């Protein structure tokens, strides 16, 4: 159990660092890959809804804390734990076609998360953006996430298989 | 069933925590406890991020450059186009520089010989070694007439043989049918120059005893009705060799002008037109009371002989020249 927690903690730290340092330079047409969101979705996909909820909450809370006051604390935590739960529930149903399933979960998950974030920001009076630009950014980021999902899925899948079963 | 329930409870608890955090943070803004937590997290995470950045940034740059590949290719194509355009400009610049130098030389030649000229561009180069004419883009509209002399910055080029209002054909010095009265600049010996195509010209010295050392310059000589200005450079005497060796009276002259690279030339408009002979009506009567010196006067005879010698020298050239001049006119 401790091994699993430690491993997921390291995955989270790595994802946060990559998101902060490497992801901005991977922007394509203004869309930046959401590596933290993708790891939440992929871990939930492989480890189930329980781990998805815990990892999603931790990852979201980390994003909120490290946002430097730009985001309201708790918003990303709430959205990512819900996303982790949903992806964890979808895991058993897409096992037959893993790559396409990962792409669908990754792409649709990131798209939904960004739209929900935009909705929260709008509701809480933060970062007023036009609906069109929000849709455009979310669509591009979702597409980007769908393309990256099989790579992250492969890494997370190997990691999960190497971990001991929870007692 | 227990596992699912546990997960749902966990989901509910964490959702509640998240909502509480949202509420607190929304109410407190940047002054609350949660703001302090954020700052503390940044204090811890900042150095980690900085160290990670140092390690990973090169990878990020590589990834970024891969991402920029499309735009880099487009930039590359644009830069290549610009480079080609600049290369073309550079070539044009070199051409303009050469043309400028050529025009300056032409101007110097015109001022040196005090000639009135009009410039023209050679638009039709000889297509082969046997072609001995070129077309220029100036004709009768510019005051050009048949028989006028054409020069370049290096010397005599040829004569106008045909012309229209806007164009003219120049028979080059290289033409075997073109004969010119010339003078060896160093010795003053006169002769006749014949073109031989791409080969050096043939100089026939009129005085059988005369000789033209190698390297001496050959210039034009105004002769009777010739329209060729005096003293225009033509070329220099070169050593004879092999089959060309025909004796000292016949020399070879290598032209200064490169007839294969003619680009801008000048047509001499005010060429001298000396009469073929003295007009009897314009003869000036000798002063009254003076008589011609008696034939027996030694001094006058010597002086007269000297004059006759000079005239005889020139005359000998002239004796040979009428038939040659006929050829010149014919050429």
Image: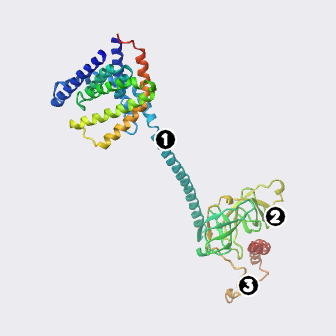
Crowdedness of circle 1 by 10 Å Cα count: few (<14), some, many (20+)? few
Q: Chain of mark 2?
A: B
Where residue A69 sits in the image (x, y, percent)? Answer: 23, 30
Q: Nearer the viewer, residue A103 or B295?
A: A103
Task: Give the left or right position of residue A56, taking residue B20 as reference.
Answer: right
Residue A48 in percent (x, y) is at 35, 20
The residue at the point 28 percent across, 34 percent down is A116
Q: Secondary structure at mark 2?
A: loop
Q: Is residue B195 visible?
A: yes
Q: Is residue B256 visible?
A: no
> Is A80 on the left or on the right of B285, as rendered?
left
Q: Secondary structure at mark 3?
A: loop
Image position of A85 with respect to B280: above or below: above
- Which secondary structure, mark 1? helix
* Pick the front one: B17 or B50: B17
The disc, 2 or 1, on the residue closer to the chain's N-terminal end is 1
- At label 3, counting other C-alpha atoms closer than 10 Å, the crowd grade (few under 14, some 14-19, many 20 or more) is few
Quadrant showing the C terminus of chain B: bottom right
Quadrant in the rendering for residue B128:
bottom right
Q: Which residue is mark 1?
A: B73
- Same subunit, tags 3 and 1: yes
Q: Estimate how packed mark 2 is, as few (under 14), some (14 to 19) or many (20 or more) residues with alpha carbons within 10 Å.
A: few
Mark 2 touches mark 3? (CB < 8 Å)? no
Q: Chain of mark 1?
A: B
Q: Which mark is residue B209?
A: 2
């Amino acid at each position: 159990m401790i091994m699993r927690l430690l491993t997921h903690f390291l995955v989270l730290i790595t994802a946060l660092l990559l998101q902060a340092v490497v992801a901005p330079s991977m922007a394509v047409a203004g869309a930046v890959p959401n590596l933290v969101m993708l790891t939440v979705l992929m871990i939930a996909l492989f480890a189930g809804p329980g781990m998805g909820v815990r990892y999603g909450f931790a990852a979201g809370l980390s994003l909120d804390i490290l946002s430097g006051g730009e985001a309201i604390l708790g918003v990303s935590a709430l959205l990512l734990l819900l996303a982790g739960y949903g992806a964890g529930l979808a895991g058993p149903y897409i096992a037959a076609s893993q790559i396409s399933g990962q792409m669908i979960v990754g792409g649709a998950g990131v798209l939904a998360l960004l739209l929900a974030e935009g909705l929260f920001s709008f509701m809480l009076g933060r970062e007023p953006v036009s609906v069109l630009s929000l849709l455009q950014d979310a669509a591009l980021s979702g597409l980007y996430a769908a393309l990256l999902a099989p790579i992250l899925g492969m890494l997370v899948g190997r990691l999960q298989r190497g971990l001991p079963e929870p007692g | 069933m227990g596992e699912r329930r546990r997960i749902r409870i966990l989901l509910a608890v964490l959702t509640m925590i998240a909502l509480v955090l949202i509420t607190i943070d929304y109410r407190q803004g940047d002054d609350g406890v949660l703001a302090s937590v954020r700052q503390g997290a940044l204090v811890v995470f900042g150095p980690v991020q900085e160290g990670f950045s140092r390690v990973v940034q090169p990878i990020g740059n590589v990834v970024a450059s891969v991402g920029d590949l499309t735009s880099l290719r487009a930039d590359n194509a644009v830069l290549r186009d610009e480079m080609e355009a600049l290369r073309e400009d550079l070539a044009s610049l070199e051409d303009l520089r050469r043309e400028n130098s050529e025009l300056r030389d032409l101007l110097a030649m015109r001022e040196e010989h005090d000639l009135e000229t009009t410039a023209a561009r050679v638009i039709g180069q000889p297509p082969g070694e046997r072609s001995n004419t070129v077309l220029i883009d100036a004709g009768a509209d510019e005051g050009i007439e048949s028989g006028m002399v054409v020069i370049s910055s290096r010397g005599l080029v040829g004569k106008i043989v045909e012309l229209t209002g806007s164009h003219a054909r120049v028979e080059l010095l290289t033409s075997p049918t073109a004969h010119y009265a010339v003078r060896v600049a160093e010795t003053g010996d006169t002769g006749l120059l014949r073109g031989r195509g791409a080969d050096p010209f043939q100089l026939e010295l009129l005085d059988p005893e005369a000789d033209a050392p190698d390297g001496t310059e050959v210039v034009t000589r105004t002769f009777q009705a010739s329209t060729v200005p005096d003293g225009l450079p033509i070329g220099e005497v070169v050593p004879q060799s092999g089959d060309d060796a025909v004796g000292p009276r016949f020399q070879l002259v290598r032209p200064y002008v490169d007839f294969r690279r003619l680009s801008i030339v000048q047509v001499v408009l005010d060429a001298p037109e000396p009469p073929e002979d003295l007009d009897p009506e314009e003869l000036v009567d000798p002063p009254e009371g003076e008589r011609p010196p008696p034939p027996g006067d030694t001094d006058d005879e010597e002086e007269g002989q000297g004059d006759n010698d000079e005239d005889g020298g020139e005359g000998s050239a002239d004796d040979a020249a009428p038939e040659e001049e006929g050829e010149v006119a014919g050429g």
